Amino acid sequence: MIEWLWPWAFAALPLPWLVRRLTARHTRQQPALAVPSMEDFAAVTQAERSQAGQSAWRLLALWVAWALLLAAVARPQFTGDPVNLPTTGRDLMLAVDISGSMATEDMEVDGDFVERLTVVKAVIANFAQARVGDRIGLVLFGTNAYLQAPLTFDVKSVNRLLIEAPVGIAGGKTAIGDAIGLAVKRLRMRQQDEKILILLTDGANNVGEVEPKIAAELAARDNIRIYTIGVGADEMRMPGLLGRISGRMTNPSADLDEDTLQAIADATGGRYFRARDPRTLIEIYALIDQLEPVEQEAEIFRPVQALYFWPLGTSVLIWVLLLIADFRRSAGSREDPHV
C-alpha cells in the first residue's frame, strides 16, 4: 500500500490562493482607456478573450504543478508485504585443522578414497550455508592458528576462504589449544549470550603456547560451548605393489587424542563426536544443527520503496513547459504588436 510520511504538507495547498487574495487588495485599479473607434475595441476584446482562455489553462497547470510538488514533499512510499526474517543470538566459530595429516586419503566417496580435508570442506560449507541469521567465523590451524574470517553474516565469503585453504599452509603440526584460545578471544569481544565453537581435528595437540584443557576452561568462563569432532577412519589399507588390495592394514587415526577432545567438550557443556566416514560427518553436523537451532524468534521486515520522485518529476516538467510557452508567447508578442 501507499503511505504518506508527511501528509500535513497538503495543508499548504490553498497557499497560492491566499497570497493572491492578500496582494489583490493592495493593487490599484487601472484607469479606463479612451478608445477612438469601435473597430479597435472589437479587436482588443477578441484578443483578450483568447488570452483569457490561455490564462485559464495556464492557471490550471500551475495548480496541478503545485499540488504535485506538495505530493512530493509529503513523501509518498510504497510499503510491501511483511517478510519474516529468522534471527538468532548465536555467534558461531568454526575451527578447522588443516595440518599435513588432513591430506590422508581415508574418506571413501562413491568407491574412491579422497582426502579428509576435501570431505570436511564440503560438509562444513553445507552446514554454514544453512545457518541463515548466525554470525559465522573461521579459524584455521596447524602449527599456528589463524583467524581466516571474523564473525560475519557473509557465509559465502567464509565458505570461499575455507575451500581455498590448502593442506599444510598453517604448518604440519597441530595446535589445538592455540586454535581454541584464538576463537575464545574473538567470541569474547561479542556480547551475545549464545556463543558456539565447533572444533574439528584429526590429531593431538603437539605444539602451541596454550594447553587445550586450559583453553577450554577459559571458554567455559565466557559461557562458550565447544563441540569437538575427531575425524579419520579407524583402519585403512595402505597401497602395495598391486594397489590397495595387496597393501597392509593400518590405523590412520592412531594420533587422534579422543580423551582431550572429550575433556574439552565436557568442560564447556558441549559434546564430542567421532567421524569415521563422510556419512557420519554429515550426520554429526546435522545433529549439531539440531542441538543449536538457527531460528529462535522471527523479525518482520516490510520492504519500502520511495515514490516522491514521480510527482516531483512531473511537477518540474509542467513548470518547464509553462516557461517554454511563456517564452514563445513573449517572442510572438514582440513580432505582432496586436497580440
Image: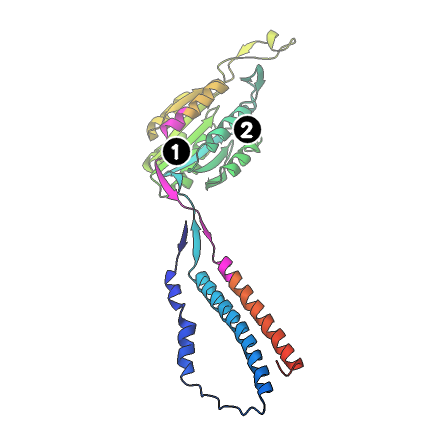
Task: Compare residues 245 and 171 and report the one nearer the observer.
Answer: 245
Task: Compare residues 141 and 311 and report the one nearer the observer.
Answer: 311
- Left or right of residue 223: residue 145: right
Disc 1 residue type (three-letter): Val
Q: What stretch is highlighted in magenta?
A: 287-312
In front: mark 1 or mark 2?
1
Between the C-alphas of marks 1 and 2, the distance is: 35 Å
**Residue density around tag 1, few if under 14, some if 14–19, many if 20 or more, within 10 Å:** some
Whether residue 257 is visible, yes or no, is no
| Scheme by which the image is coloured | rainbow
Q: What element carries label 1?
A: loop
Disc 2 residue type (three-letter): Gly
**Residue density around tag 2, few if under 14, some if 14–19, many if 20 or more, within 10 Å:** some
Residue 331: image location, x then y, percent: 64, 77
Q: In which quarter of the image is residue 171?
A: top right
Pointers 1 and 2 in contact (C-beta within 8 Å): no
Whether residue 335 is visible, yes or no, is yes
Q: Quadrant of residue 67?
A: bottom left
Q: Is mark 2 on a helix, strand or loop?
A: loop
Q: Residue 294 carries which label?
A: 1
- Left or right of residue 165: residue 293: left
- Residue 297 lies in the magenta-colored region: yes
Task: Compare residues 39 and 66 and report the one nearer the observer.
Answer: 39
- Residue 20 lies in the magenta-colored region: no
Residue at image mark 2 = 172
Residue 330: image location, x then y, percent: 61, 78
Judged from this view, the residue extending furthest toward the front is: 38
Q: Which residue is drawn at the image coordinates 52% and 69% (left, top)?
A: 57
